[in-house]
Amino acid sequence: MNSGDPVPEAWRSQVSEVMIGSADIATRLNDLAADISADYMALNPVLVVVLKGSFIFASDLSRALTIPHEVEFMRAKSYQGVSTTGVVQIEGIDLTKLIDRHVIIIEDIIDTGLTLNRIYAKVQSAGVASVKTCVLLEKMGQQRRRDVPFFDYVAFHVPEKFVVGYGLDMDQTLRHLPFIGVYKN
Ligand code: XMP
Ligand code: MG
Protein backbone atom coordinates (compact mmCIF):
# COMPACT_ATOMS: atom_id res chain seq x y z
CA MET A 1 0.00 0.00 0.00
CA ASN A 2 1.23 3.48 -0.88
CA SER A 3 0.70 6.84 0.80
CA GLY A 4 -2.58 8.38 -0.35
CA ASP A 5 -4.15 5.08 -1.34
CA PRO A 6 -7.80 4.67 -0.33
CA VAL A 7 -8.35 3.65 3.30
CA PRO A 8 -9.27 -0.06 3.40
CA GLU A 9 -12.99 -0.59 3.89
CA ALA A 10 -12.55 -2.11 7.36
CA TRP A 11 -11.06 1.12 8.79
CA ARG A 12 -12.96 3.74 6.84
CA SER A 13 -15.17 4.77 9.76
CA GLN A 14 -12.14 5.57 11.96
CA VAL A 15 -9.41 6.59 9.55
CA SER A 16 -9.73 9.42 7.03
CA GLU A 17 -6.48 9.08 5.11
CA VAL A 18 -3.51 6.80 4.49
CA MET A 19 -0.80 9.29 5.46
CA ILE A 20 2.12 6.88 5.00
CA GLY A 21 1.56 3.55 3.28
CA SER A 22 3.25 0.31 4.26
CA ALA A 23 5.43 0.28 1.12
CA ASP A 24 6.73 3.77 1.86
CA ILE A 25 7.39 2.85 5.50
CA ALA A 26 9.42 -0.19 4.43
CA THR A 27 11.47 1.79 1.89
CA ARG A 28 12.28 4.54 4.39
CA LEU A 29 13.13 2.07 7.17
CA ASN A 30 15.62 0.30 4.93
CA ASP A 31 17.42 3.62 4.30
CA LEU A 32 17.34 4.47 8.00
CA ALA A 33 18.66 1.03 8.93
CA ALA A 34 21.48 1.39 6.41
CA ASP A 35 22.48 4.72 7.99
CA ILE A 36 22.40 3.30 11.51
CA SER A 37 24.27 0.15 10.45
CA ALA A 38 27.03 2.31 8.93
CA ASP A 39 27.21 4.63 11.95
CA TYR A 40 27.31 1.83 14.54
CA MET A 41 29.53 -0.70 12.80
CA ALA A 42 31.32 -2.76 15.51
CA LEU A 43 29.72 -0.77 18.39
CA ASN A 44 27.06 -3.38 19.27
CA PRO A 45 24.45 -0.70 20.14
CA VAL A 46 21.47 -1.24 22.42
CA LEU A 47 18.11 -0.21 21.01
CA VAL A 48 16.06 1.08 23.92
CA VAL A 49 12.48 0.78 22.71
CA VAL A 50 9.89 3.05 24.30
CA LEU A 51 6.68 1.04 24.68
CA LYS A 52 4.05 0.67 23.61
CA GLY A 53 3.92 2.87 20.52
CA SER A 54 7.34 1.90 19.15
CA PHE A 55 6.92 -1.86 19.14
CA ILE A 56 6.21 -2.33 15.43
CA PHE A 57 8.68 0.33 14.29
CA ALA A 58 11.40 -1.20 16.48
CA SER A 59 10.77 -4.75 15.30
CA ASP A 60 10.95 -3.74 11.64
CA LEU A 61 13.99 -1.51 12.20
CA SER A 62 15.82 -4.17 14.20
CA ARG A 63 15.33 -6.74 11.43
CA ALA A 64 16.56 -4.28 8.81
CA LEU A 65 19.84 -3.59 10.66
CA THR A 66 22.82 -5.46 9.29
CA ILE A 67 25.01 -5.09 12.39
CA PRO A 68 24.97 -6.90 15.75
CA HIS A 69 22.80 -5.11 18.30
CA GLU A 70 20.72 -5.74 21.40
CA VAL A 71 17.19 -4.68 22.30
CA GLU A 72 15.79 -3.45 25.64
CA PHE A 73 12.37 -2.04 26.43
CA MET A 74 11.01 0.70 28.69
CA ARG A 75 7.72 2.38 29.48
CA ALA A 76 7.39 6.13 29.78
CA LYS A 77 4.38 7.59 31.52
CA SER A 78 3.68 11.27 31.15
CA TYR A 79 1.87 13.28 33.75
CA GLN A 80 1.28 16.73 32.35
CA GLY A 81 -0.23 19.10 34.88
CA VAL A 82 -0.94 22.78 34.70
CA SER A 83 2.73 23.66 34.59
CA THR A 84 4.55 23.37 31.28
CA THR A 85 7.19 21.13 32.81
CA GLY A 86 5.49 17.76 32.77
CA VAL A 87 6.85 14.79 34.67
CA VAL A 88 7.77 11.65 32.78
CA GLN A 89 8.14 8.46 34.79
CA ILE A 90 10.33 5.71 33.38
CA GLU A 91 9.54 2.10 34.18
CA GLY A 92 10.49 -1.38 33.13
CA ILE A 93 14.22 -1.02 32.50
CA ASP A 94 17.29 -1.66 34.60
CA LEU A 95 19.39 1.35 33.66
CA THR A 96 22.57 -0.32 34.93
CA LYS A 97 22.38 -2.53 31.83
CA LEU A 98 23.17 0.55 29.76
CA ILE A 99 26.45 1.45 31.48
CA ASP A 100 29.23 1.97 28.92
CA ARG A 101 26.88 1.00 26.07
CA HIS A 102 26.04 2.88 22.88
CA VAL A 103 22.31 3.50 23.22
CA ILE A 104 19.77 4.36 20.54
CA ILE A 105 16.40 5.38 21.97
CA ILE A 106 13.56 4.27 19.70
CA GLU A 107 10.42 6.43 20.02
CA ASP A 108 7.24 6.47 17.98
CA ILE A 109 6.33 10.13 17.74
CA ILE A 110 7.55 13.54 18.82
CA ASP A 111 4.94 16.17 19.49
CA THR A 112 6.21 18.73 22.00
CA GLY A 113 9.37 16.70 22.54
CA LEU A 114 8.85 16.56 26.29
CA THR A 115 8.67 12.79 26.61
CA LEU A 116 11.82 12.12 24.62
CA ASN A 117 13.62 14.98 26.35
CA ARG A 118 13.03 13.36 29.74
CA ILE A 119 13.93 9.85 28.55
CA TYR A 120 17.10 11.19 26.94
CA ALA A 121 18.18 12.87 30.19
CA LYS A 122 17.54 9.71 32.21
CA VAL A 123 19.48 7.50 29.81
CA GLN A 124 22.34 9.97 29.51
CA SER A 125 22.74 10.09 33.29
CA ALA A 126 22.96 6.28 33.45
CA GLY A 127 26.65 6.22 32.50
CA VAL A 128 26.24 5.30 28.85
CA ALA A 129 29.04 5.50 26.29
CA SER A 130 26.76 7.47 23.94
CA VAL A 131 23.09 8.11 23.33
CA LYS A 132 21.22 8.99 20.17
CA THR A 133 17.54 9.14 19.34
CA CYS A 134 15.62 7.51 16.52
CA VAL A 135 12.01 8.48 15.95
CA LEU A 136 9.41 7.26 13.51
CA LEU A 137 7.46 10.51 13.24
CA GLU A 138 8.25 14.09 14.11
CA LYS A 139 5.24 16.40 14.13
CA MET A 140 6.02 19.75 12.61
CA GLY A 141 4.11 22.21 14.74
CA GLN A 142 4.33 25.38 16.75
CA GLN A 143 4.32 23.62 20.09
CA ARG A 144 7.63 21.92 19.43
CA ARG A 145 9.92 22.65 22.37
CA ARG A 146 13.27 24.21 21.73
CA ASP A 147 14.95 22.60 24.75
CA VAL A 148 14.82 19.09 23.33
CA PRO A 149 17.90 17.21 22.25
CA PHE A 150 18.57 16.95 18.58
CA PHE A 151 16.71 14.04 17.01
CA ASP A 152 19.45 12.05 15.33
CA TYR A 153 17.36 9.79 13.09
CA VAL A 154 13.84 10.72 11.97
CA ALA A 155 11.93 8.48 9.57
CA PHE A 156 9.22 10.97 8.60
CA HIS A 157 8.19 14.56 9.32
CA VAL A 158 4.43 14.84 9.49
CA PRO A 159 1.83 17.60 9.86
CA GLU A 160 0.06 18.13 13.17
CA LYS A 161 -2.73 15.61 12.81
CA PHE A 162 -3.56 12.79 15.20
CA VAL A 163 -2.18 9.63 13.64
CA VAL A 164 -2.82 5.96 14.31
CA GLY A 165 -1.49 2.63 13.14
CA TYR A 166 1.95 1.04 12.84
CA GLY A 167 2.09 0.97 16.67
CA LEU A 168 0.33 4.26 17.34
CA ASP A 169 -3.01 4.06 19.10
CA MET A 170 -6.26 5.81 19.78
CA ASP A 171 -7.15 4.70 23.33
CA GLN A 172 -5.25 1.44 22.76
CA THR A 173 -6.99 0.63 19.49
CA LEU A 174 -5.77 0.74 15.88
CA ARG A 175 -2.12 0.00 16.73
CA HIS A 176 -2.11 -2.96 14.38
CA LEU A 177 -2.89 -1.10 11.15
CA PRO A 178 -0.03 -1.80 8.72
CA PHE A 179 0.00 1.87 7.60
CA ILE A 180 0.08 5.26 9.35
CA GLY A 181 -3.34 6.84 9.06
CA VAL A 182 -5.06 10.04 10.10
CA TYR A 183 -7.61 9.45 12.84
CA LYS A 184 -11.15 10.58 12.05
CA ASN A 185 -12.59 12.69 14.89
P1 XMP B 1 5.46 14.77 23.40
O1 XMP B 1 4.63 16.02 23.41
O2 XMP B 1 5.97 14.42 24.76
O3 XMP B 1 4.43 13.68 23.00
O4 XMP B 1 6.55 14.84 22.35
C1 XMP B 1 4.86 12.43 22.59
C2 XMP B 1 3.84 11.40 22.99
O5 XMP B 1 2.50 11.82 22.71
C3 XMP B 1 1.76 10.80 22.10
N1 XMP B 1 1.29 11.29 20.80
C4 XMP B 1 0.56 10.61 19.90
N2 XMP B 1 0.09 9.34 19.91
N3 XMP B 1 -0.90 9.66 17.79
C5 XMP B 1 -0.63 8.88 18.84
O6 XMP B 1 -1.05 7.73 18.83
C6 XMP B 1 -0.47 10.94 17.70
O7 XMP B 1 -0.74 11.63 16.70
C7 XMP B 1 0.30 11.44 18.82
N4 XMP B 1 0.89 12.64 19.07
C8 XMP B 1 1.48 12.50 20.29
C9 XMP B 1 2.68 9.63 22.01
O8 XMP B 1 2.38 8.75 23.08
C10 XMP B 1 4.07 10.15 22.20
O9 XMP B 1 4.93 9.26 22.89
MG1 MG C 1 4.38 7.00 23.11
Image (tube, rainbow, N blue to C red):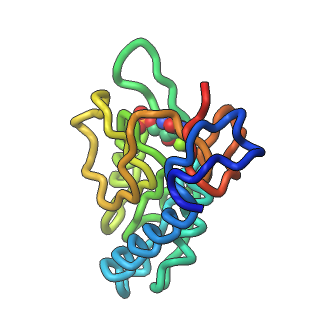
Rendered-image quadrant of the N terminus: bottom right
Residue at the image point whose x is 42% and y is 54% from the top: 135
Residue 10 image offset from top left, x and y in percent: 77, 45
For residue 58, what is the image quadrant? Answer: bottom right
Indicate whether 158 appears above or below 37: above
Task: Kindly give the residue lying farthest to the left in the view shown.
Answer: 146
Question: How many labels sit on residues?
Answer: 0
Q: Nearer the viewer, residue 17 or 51?
A: 17
Indicate whether 133 appears above or below 160: below
Q: Is residue 72 visible?
A: no
Residue at the image point whose x is 47% and y is 22% from the top: 80
Q: Is residue 53 visible?
A: yes
Task: Kindly give the residue lying farthest to the front in the view shown.
Answer: 6
Q: Is residue 175 left or right of residue 43?
A: right
Residue 179 image offset from top left, x and y in percent: 60, 54
Rendered-image quadrant of the C terminus: top right
Task: Kindly give the residue lying farthest to the right in the view shown.
Answer: 10
Indicate whether 68 appears above or below 116: below
Q: Nearer the viewer, residue 91 or 24?
A: 24
Q: Is residue 166 left or right of residue 41?
A: right
Residue 61 image offset from top left, x and y in percent: 52, 69
Indicate whether 82 appears above or below 112: above
Residue at the image point whose x is 34% and y is 75% from the top: 35
Q: Is residue 110 left or right of residue 18?
A: left
